[in-house]
Image (cartoon, rainbow, N blue to C red):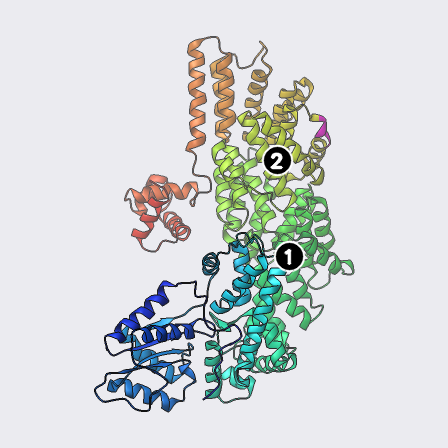
Amino acid sequence: MTPTTSVSAIGDRPDPSLPVSRTASWVSGIVDRAHRGHPLCAVAVGTPGSGRSALLTAVHEQFRLRDVPVSIGLPAATGAGAGPVFVLADDMHLWPGPMIETALGMLDAGTIGLIATAEPRELDPGVRLLRDRARPYGAVLELEALGTADVLTRATRMGLTVDPTTASQIRRRCGGVPALVDAALRSVRAAAGGNPQGVDAPSDDLISIVERLAREWHHRLLRGLDPLTLAVLALASVRAPLDPDSVADAAGADRVAAAGALDRARGCGLLRGSDVFVSAAAGPLRDVLGDRRIGELRHKSAVTALRAAELTPDIALLAAEAGVDDARIVDALVAGATDATAARAVVLLRAAERVAPGRDDVRLLMAQRALASGDLDGAGGAADQRLETAGPADPGVEEWVELAATVAAQRGLASHAADLYRWGAANSSAPQSLPAAVALLAVGDRAAVTAIAEADRGRAPVASRAARSLVTRGLLATLDDADDTPSGDAVDAVIRGLSAGGAASRGPYAGRVLHAAIAVALNHGDTVGAQTIRSVAPESGHALIDAEIALTVGDLEAAARLIPSDDPVGMPERLRWQGIRLGLARRRGDTAALTAAWQHGLSLLAATEVDLYLLRSFGEFWIAAASLGQLSAVDRYVGAADRLLARLDDPPAWSQFWDFAGVQAAAVARDDAAVAHRLARLDLAAAQNRTARSLAVAARAWVSLTRGGSDTVADTAAEVTAAVDALRSIGLQWEAARLAGMAALRADDPSTAAGLLDTARSAGEDRRRTPPVGGPLTDREAEVAHELLQGFTYREIGERLYISAKTVEHHVARIRRRLDAGSRSELLAALRAAGYR
């Protein structure tokens, strides 16, 4: 008979102090049935060390106590009419096929009952027959590997207390084998000495003991396996394909033999789940089989796999690790890394780098993935190395320029990002035109952005280029905002461009493009437009954008709920994050929180250059500095912002909110000269822009009420109401409510005060009635959704909303995509579930 693979040094018997209800029930059921003389076929299926032999011993002991006739192995003959003899057959997977057939024949004849154990061999015909015969009796017991919770339970029953980390370490090193886990726990208990109740951490000594036991176990187990089964395990250890054909080709065996070896490898317990090799056995396998043999098997497997019609990343990785020379390998690895997780991409790209050192597309993708994971130093170092000796017209250099510019922007160095695009202007291909325009506009280089727009206009108007051009033209339109050019045109152009081409949702510069677009909308007082822009780029910084929008409309509860709890990676995002915290603390009147946020933000001010898209955040710092008596700390940043705006001729779309913040800061500091200067700038902008006019009216009322003097311009409720209306018209609901509240407190006439308080309450309610920030639908889509839920047709909805039925149809299609709804009933149900009525 073929030798068994049982590991005798540790044994297959679990600790006797560990009663296991499932196995105990199996034993008692067998014994009760046999004691009554009923027919029986039972089988315990498990890998070596699972306790299957111990179960057979327990059955034997119970049979002896009850005088049940027992035979160890097949009896030579049975007495007629004496009833069945119960055969105990351990490791029945090792029995020859004819002997198994004889046993099953005697079972069918009623001369024997059969209680057997076997490894879980799915392809072995004898084991399959045995399991099929035992199923009608309900007596097939599957013994599985232990999990961490099982290890904790077994430790407790041994009187040993271990923490989950230690239990997990023991389980992993023992491969979940019950007998090996029990032996490890006994050794840990002995090593713990006088304090078995508290093994709090997996110390090096304890883990060393467990590793030694596991290594010895795996050595004995592997030495009992045949060469072909060892070859299968070797292939599994290097993640090679394990189908019978691949195994046969790699090991030089026929397919039937390979299938049998694969079955034996699975049955021995060293393959888990989807044929994943137990890592703790890797060292012993190398000791038993040798690195040279494992390398040969891996190389043969890789060569065989390369013949497949489709070269997958897994096969390419196997080939790369095996040292196979094939030009397709790197292409497959790069393709796989493009959409892989960060950790997986690193593995694939490092393999590609080993196969083709210095290949540009591999290095670029590695740097891009480093950037995506927040490793600015790694990405920046790779970009610097590549660009150090490059020329601006070199093939492929534009993608490196974009990467380096993204790193610079993430570090808060807007001028460096712009310099990179200026240097690479000779080779600025269409895909890089929008990121270049965004970077150059940030530092006030109107001429360069205009040149980019003109160059794009001369190229073929394919869809992607048209989308990018729309966004670029929208950004340029913000520099020439005047009454004959409606402010909403710039926002609409940006929205249409982002929606049409997905320009902000791809590439390393995506977050910067999105931030620029959001800044455009918020600086126009268009919070609905900002929400729309946010919705077309779902991968990028939602929480920060949502918190900014909520703070702008004055929904402080939503802003506090939505602001990320951890610091973002990039310096501009950190500055925006800190600006929101400052804005929340100031609006709530929380001086302690304002002081704490200010102290935390000082280093961010020093590390981040002023750029156009960060003016609103710098404005929050400006007002906070005035509130805390720290204006001198921001003087140089205020000056830098003023110079930046001056280079662009103070476009109202960007200067109006900045100067409104300046008015508030100067009013708090009671600096009359600064107040007059900022009001004069607002007045100049008001001559060109309706939003600036609203801010100018509100600013004068704000200054008068903040000063607290008798010569206020808001002497009448009508003037205050006009200022409040101006603020509400551009979405500044908190400022509107604050202004009305301050006026009410200063009003002498009770009826006037009551009216102003009503106005303040109304403005406060408006900021909570705004469309849900971060909700799945835009404002217009929410309107369409409301009409859909009322049962109106597309034509009727169009008439009610003054849009065409075709436009309604487009809105509904987009709503379906956002809510992942199929039929009309699913769509309506999803809308109701999302809170739309």
- Which residue is denoted by mark 1 in the rendering? 370
Q: Against 368, is 666 above or below?
A: above
What is the crowding at mark 2: few (fewer than 14 residues within 10 Å), some, or many (at least 20)?
many
Q: Nearer the viewer, residue 672 or 215?
A: 215
Q: Percent x, y for residue 733?
A: 48, 28
Q: Is 74 on the left-hand or right-hand side of 540? A: left
- The label on residue 699 is none
Query: Magenta residues, as a range?
Result: 632-636
Which one is earlier in the sequence, the residue at label 1 or at label 2?
1
**Residue 381 in sight in this render:** yes
Q: Nearer the viewer, mark 1 or mark 2?
A: 1
In the rendered image, residue 651, in percent from the top left (x then y), is placed at: 63, 35
* Residue in front for this viewpoint, 41 or 362: 41
Q: Assess whether residue 296 is covered by the magenta stretch.
A: no
Q: Residue furthest left?
A: 81
Secondary element type, mark 2: helix
Which amino acid type corresponds to the residue marked 1 in the rendered image?
A: Ala
Q: Is residue 339 visible?
A: no
Task: Identify the residue position indicated by label 2 in the image.
Answer: 617
Distance from Cα at disc 1 to Cα at disc 2: 28 Å
